[in-house]
Amino acid sequence: MSKKNLIVGQSGGPTAVINSSLYGVVSEGLRHPEQIQHIYGMVNGIEGFLAGTVLDFATALPGSSLEKLKTTPGAYLGSCRYKLPESLEDPVYPRLFQKFREMNIGWFFYIGGNDSMDTVSKLSRYAAQTGSDIRIIGEPKTIDNDLVHTDHTPGFGSAARYVASTVREITIDANVYEKKSVTIVEIMGRHAGWLTAASALARKYKGDNPLLIYLPETTFDQEAFLKAVEKSFEKNCNVIVCVSEGIHDAEGTFICEYDSSVGTDTFGHKMLAGCGKYLENLVRSRLGVKARSVELNVSQRCSVSMMSATDQMEAVTAGNFGVQAALNGETGKMVSFLRETGTDGSYSMKCSLEDVNVICNEEKTVPADWITADGSDVTQDFLDYAAPLIQGTVEIPLGTDGLPDFVYRK
Amino acid sequence: MSKKNLIVGQSGGPTAVINSSLYGVVSEGLRHPEQIQHIYGMVNGIEGFLAGTVLDFATALPGSSLEKLKTTPGAYLGSCRYKLPESLEDPVYPRLFQKFREMNIGWFFYIGGNDSMDTVSKLSRYAAQTGSDIRIIGEPKTIDNDLVHTDHTPGFGSAARYVASTVREITIDANVYEKKSVTIVEIMGRHAGWLTAASALARKYKGDNPLLIYLPETTFDQEAFLKAVEKSFEKNCNVIVCVSEGIHDAEGTFICEYDSSVGTDTFGHKMLAGCGKYLENLVRSRLGVKARSVELNVSQRCSVSMMSATDQMEAVTAGNFGVQAALNGETGKMVSFLRETGTDGSYSMKCSLEDVNVICNEEKTVPADWITADGSDVTQDFLDYAAPLIQGTVEIPLGTDGLPDFVYRK
């Protein structure tokens, strides 16, 4: 059998472990020299591939330097937000497959979320249509945890651990003064509230902060929110409220839009502050108490300081598994996670494969029965689900400057 | 000699290591049972002490539980922002000293910044005036690093390490796309730019981000800033700009005020967005490029994820040293740090004492010759100064939930 080459790309927003998935693909590829000759990386995803920017891992990350991928955040290969045309008749498809042939590609891996799985779906359907034998596999990645047909996604555990530990620290920061205060913490998640829900893991004891948690899966009522804050003061004079960026009212208007409808900067442009800033102003204006807001922002997806060892290990495993599946002839699939719960309640995870076509256009939100009836908290079911995913600390190698030593593309 | 009691309080904003200073005071106190009977903590500083809220460390943190202070952020004892009256004739002074007598206090320690040193100054002057033999010592603490007569302050090193590593991660996050973008990172520091300057430590190679750094020590010119951003695109298509929250124009108007002068929320209240959000809008409007802003916010002072081992160790040492000094009869002093540089360039730190009266009303800013002529960067002198302070990682103990296990006041 003549050898072929493997190519892998990353797409969409980065996570703490998207490079661990990459490590999983490349390291497994290296274990099959009898079938795989070169292992290539697309620089800036499918868009970069079309532009001809490809690297060879043998020269880019030789020997043990590959290991550093596992503790480097962001997307080592660079990313893109390029959507392939819906019509498989589009001339971009023959162009792509011509390039695959020229590079003798036998296996194609794409690490990403919903949109990336759409790319995997289109490429694999085009391959089937045209009789190409390239094996095309999707590797899941998203802090949003919103992919269907998988228990969870690589990237979520580390982001959830970052959110939980940061909210715990913000709680401690808020508690130093004895005066009434409200802190609004704005967490990523436009449509799915998984990451915001993870703030509940911050609680150290019953009745601990965050006392209120609002997800985009429910309707956000400003008056009910203000009443809930007032009631929370009975438990703690410092109230922490965690909200998803995507919370919205009954009409579907995002709460963050309430602000931009009035604020304009000196250039007449709408000010795009988040819902946290809006709610901070609302609380201060209506309740007359000290209020502040904290937007956790990009650190949720790019910090390795709270990387979950479980998440990292699972990302590597998923990468390995995808390559094994492709070598076994699988294509048009996404690697998925099946949870196995032992009789003692212990957690373990098993990889499986799902048809990528049923994944790419769906979005998994937090189940309604994992949210309390008043929409201001999550239930024990969510905590039981999320807790195993944030376990374990990863030691991040330091450089001579005393700071995390990441690996960079030359 | 009859035994007396020691009391310690915390004041002002928290830091990652203010509890390490507390540990230093309490642990040293425990080593002198022949002189010190009880070790008390003021809950919520001098304000709480006046209200009678005091705890005994023997019951609050017995045995090895005291160790957890070293890895718990925030202020274990709680804090206050209470300024003692200027006139030592005010009746609060005899009230305070009456309480000291009732509690048989021989040694008083106050951990804090400028305002806390003002308290130490007033109490020690009142003690001198009235012939009280209570020894009153200040323990420095501030992420702002703005206390005079000390090489640096406990809290700065960990905050600087947090800023540097977070900016390095944000740089990686920005670099995943190949399209022009500007990220404004807003860092704490109203008058002193030490912490913003620490973002320069994030650079991994010459010409790395952050490409622009603006401190409140210089005048911020918006037009010059826009030109500098455009020029930076020649080096990197993704430009990271770090700014102190306190940057201001030539008239002394804070840049953040440009926003609040126009933005109002639905209740007619001024929107108080920071200068980062303002500059984000400025860049987007004027340069027509993708722009975003990240406010590092309270995590700068309350996160232990990037605690500097050097900073932690020095905070403990300062606490120890203060108690030894008080037992030796010193009073009205603040513990200060003297830097010692070995012939091989190695760093070491020695504790000393400074008259608290010359510290409490001064503010140390970044020297003008540590800032480049165009005010958009810091020099090698600053890097040489700051680098030793961020060295070493501290292992944070985890609880059964897999998250940092902090110690809480009952």
Image (spheres, coloured by chain):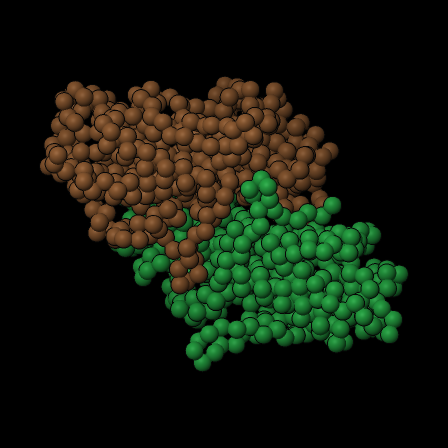
Chain colours: A brown, B green
Residue A351 position within the rendered picture, expressed as x and y whole percent measured from the top left: 38, 30
Side of A333 relative to B343 (left or right): left
In this rendered view, identify the residue nearer to me: A108 or B372: A108
Which residue is outermost to the bottom? B343
Occupied quadrant, residue B32: bottom right
Residue A204: image quadrant is top right
- A110 versus A27 height, above or below: above
Tell me if A386 is positioned left or right of B85 in this view. Answer: left
**In which quadrant will I find the N terminus of chain B?**
bottom right
Question: In the image, is residue A289 above or below residue B39?
Answer: above
The relative height of residue A173 versus residue B20 in the rendered view (above or below) is: above
Residue A82 in sight in this render: no
Residue B392 or residue A183, whichever sits in front: B392
- Residue positioned 33% across, 19% down in the render: A358
Residue B5: x, y in percent? 82, 64
What percent of the width, then of the height, locates residue B322? 69, 69
Residue A205, located in which quarter of the rendered image? top right
**At x 25% / y 38%, what residue is drawn?**
A8
